[in-house]
Amino acid sequence: MKKITPQMFITLIENKEERFAIIINHWFYYIEKGRIYKFQQHSNAKVLTMMDSYYDGQMDSETLINELKKSIINQIQYDWFTDVWMEAIIERIGGSAYDLEAFFF
């Protein structure tokens, strides 16, 4: 997990080179080559629960990343992602003074 600023996030989307998951307002998004996908609600709740386990010390970072990858693959397989407009996500984080938590693959 890596903390990135909202401006770094925008740059990563515009460069269209990175593949990562990110938490924005208690919701997970998966970004690949500049496209933004929102996690399906059930998967989002499951991954947020895993994050709690990680922060409580019940899960290490490697296990968290592996579970996150499984969730992404499962959602791709069944086409459960929702496309998100880049403008909408940039508007959501644009005024934020807080860093975002990103998981790079």
Image: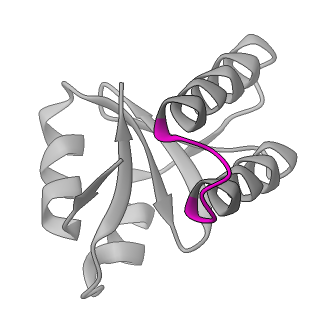
Task: Answer left or right for 76 relative to 103.
Answer: right
Q: Please name the predominant secondary structure of the magenta segment in the image.
A: loop
Viewer-proximal residue among 92 and 65: 65
Q: Position of residue 82 (x, y in %)?
A: 67, 41
In terms of image quadrants, where is residue 78?
A: top right
Please give the name of the residue rendered at 58% of the width and 24% of the height, measured from the top-left corner: 66
Q: How is the image coloured?
A: one colour
Residue farthest toward the right in the current orientation of the protein: 42
In terms of image quadrants, where is residue 68?
A: top right
Please give the name of the residue rendered at 63% of the width and 45% of the height, measured from the top-left corner: 59
Task: Answer left or right for 97 relative to 43.
Answer: left
Please give the name of the residue rendered at 79% of the width and 43% of the height, measured from the top-left corner: 43
In terms of image quadrants, where is residue 4?
A: bottom left
Viewer-proximal residue among 102 and 39: 102
Give the magenta part as a residue range. Answer: 55-61
Q: Is residue 41 above or below residue 64?
A: below
Q: Position of residue 94 (x, y in %)?
A: 27, 78
Q: Position of residue 85 (x, y in %)?
A: 46, 51
Q: Is residue 63 magenta?
A: no
Q: Position of residue 27 (x, y in %)?
A: 62, 62
